Amino acid sequence: MPGVSPGWLDFEQPLAELFERLEEVNALGVTTEIKKLQQQIEELKIKLYANLTPWQRVQLARHPRRPYTLDYIERMVTNFVELHGDRAFADDPAIVAGLGKIDEIPFAIIGHQKGKDTKEKLTRNFGMPHPEGYRKALRIMELAARNNVPILCLIDTPGAYPGIGAEERGQAEAIARNLREMALLTVPVIAVVTGEGGSGGALAIAVGDRVLMQENAVYSVISPEGCAAILWRDGSRAEEAAKVLKLTAPDLLNLGVIDEIVPEPLGGAHHDWDEAARLLKKAVMANYHVLNTLPGEELVSRRIEKFSAIGVFQQGEEK
Amino acid sequence: MVESSARSGETLWFRCSRCGEIIYRKTLESNFYICNRCGYHFRITPEDYIRIILDDGTWEEIDADILALDPLKFPKYQEKLKEARAKTGHADAFAYGRGRTGGVPVVFGVMDFNFIGGSMGPVVGEKVARSVRLARNERRPLIIVATSGGARMQEGILSLMQMAKTSAELALLRRDGVPFISVPVDPCTAGVMASFASLGDVIISEPGALLGFAGQRVIEDTIGQKLPEGFQRAEFMLKHGLIDIVTPRRRLKETIVNILSVLWHGERL
Ligand SMILES: [Zn+2]
């Protein structure tokens, strides 16, 4: 059994091997072999990624090679200026916030940020914000609203950080306040889940007029591992839990929780960051142009109605 | 032996889960379910809070007949709902209605921790949202006693969205200047604490109540150490500026009435 190539998932191993062979052949410059391998790769991609299980989607959403917020900003946004700090305690590197332009239109951009290497992972706290991150996000969103600037939120977090400092400084309050205040923003808010939509820590920057999900993103009330631990007292049964939680983009579209699925390059965003960014930008701008026709108060009332309408129940005969 | 649940059929004697004192039922009832030796506040039912906070005979429940569906076809959820309904006699984990406290007409809501851990799914979310709307439409102050382990896993992402729904409705209530008094009691964590329960204009809790975002075991597993004594208790929340008041249960009503007498002096209906 060959060793697992770094940065590839278990089920992607056959593909990783083909890529390795392609590199070797490329070095030798044998054109016919190169063509043959490239075709094999495309065929295998279609086969591998055509019928992904929910658990495989979870793995793709967490893929170590997946582009993160700053990668998208680099490809989609010009004149980007990052802004820092919650004006009270600290700057939280697990959330990036700033101002820039997309297709010459001014935007405020907020997003969770994970790290690429070990050092950055630690700095970014694996994309798990403290209260300061949420407070910074709200500060920039309110700044945007006061200046009639639309807001783009990119969501990719395992969840809000569960730690001592986070509790002492009001993690619950920070999330709750964002949920309340985002409802009142008088500018278009477009939220896109680009990776892991980890529960309240994700929702705290995802109260959008339009909520989108990338094709291989997941969005859930609890991690599959956490769900399995509660259901079967066995965190290793995450694969089954991923199925019952209904956390994939098509599931959420069916449940009426999201508005649209943003396509990714074949095999996932990690195969082609530029193409993933192009597809994301296209979806964001299409939604922006629709929302931009609505006055601020109309956006607010529609946004509140949209979230108020989510959920199913039955009511017995009227009393 | 009964520890923290003060209501289990015809039990005559209760043991305090903090100090071990054995207390006669009638004594406990007449003392607001507070241990007369150590001051431990037993967990109590929604009916108890209605009796403690509202004026006698003023409670009129609304929407008691809203029932959960099983949109995810989640393993064992139907059985869990059936059991919880049988155990509590309630349709779900939240009840709301009109009432008066100290003569002031209010909208009152209360959660039931015995109903699947007080978890918030679409039924709880919808009823909390309706209670907020009622308070806004009738301009009555809103009081909610919250106790919950968070969002209801069995209704998945739909439960998570109730956090946004309840908070958005509260945004409008706040904009219209109708006060909301939140009373998170033991325990209140995760999705409920990270939404409406943290959004009170005034937040009141009881001594020793566990309040916070993350569960204690999750934090311990994450940071790899034991949590200090008193962590996430109401007194800790007070010290860190996250709630307004910790009051013994016997003074809960008086505290609420005092606050409303100032905030709501001009709007008695
Ligand atoms: Zn005691």
Image (spheres, coloured by chain):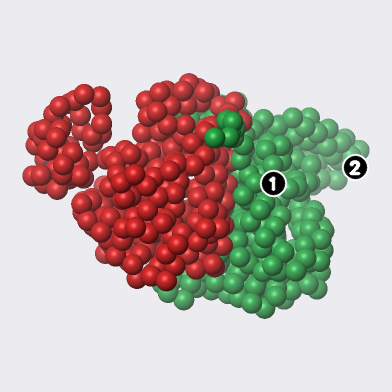
Chain colours: A green, B red
Q: Earlier in the sequence, mark 2 or mark 1?
A: 2
Residue B7: x %, y % from top left: 25, 31
Whether callout 2 and callout 1 share a subunit is answered yes
Q: Is residue B158 left or right of residue B52?
A: right
Q: Residue sitting at 54 percent across and 67 percent down? A: B176
Residue drawn at (39%, 45%) of the image: B59
Chain letter of disc 2 in the image: A
Q: Is residue A241 left or right of residue A53?
A: left
Q: Is residue A252 visible?
A: yes
Which circle, 2 or 1, is nearer the viewer? 1
Q: Which residue is labeled 2 in the image?
A: A31
Which of the two residues, B88 or A200, is positioned nearer the viewer here?
A: B88
Which residue is at the front of the view, B31 or A126? Answer: B31
Task: Tell me how far mark 2 sits from mark 1, CA to CA.
Answer: 45 Å
Are there few (<14), some (14-19), or many (20+) residues within 10 Å of tag 2? few
Q: Quadrant of residue A96?
A: bottom right
**In screen coordinates, is B20 left or right of A163?**
left
Q: Quadrant of the N terminus of chain B?
A: top left
Q: Quadrant of ligand 1?
A: top left
Instruction: Name the quadrant containing residue B42.
Output: top left
Residue that label 1 marks: A258
Q: Quadrant of the C terminus of chain B?
A: bottom left
Q: Residue at x 52, y 33 (%)?
A: B65
Instruction: Locate residue A248: give its quadrant.
Output: top right
When the figure is inspected, residue A88 is found, relative to residue A27, above or below; the finding is: below
Whether residue A288 is visible here, answered yes or no, is no
Residue found at the far right of this picture: A32
Q: Is residue A90 above or below residue B219?
A: below
For label 2, being within 8 Å of ligand 1 is answered no
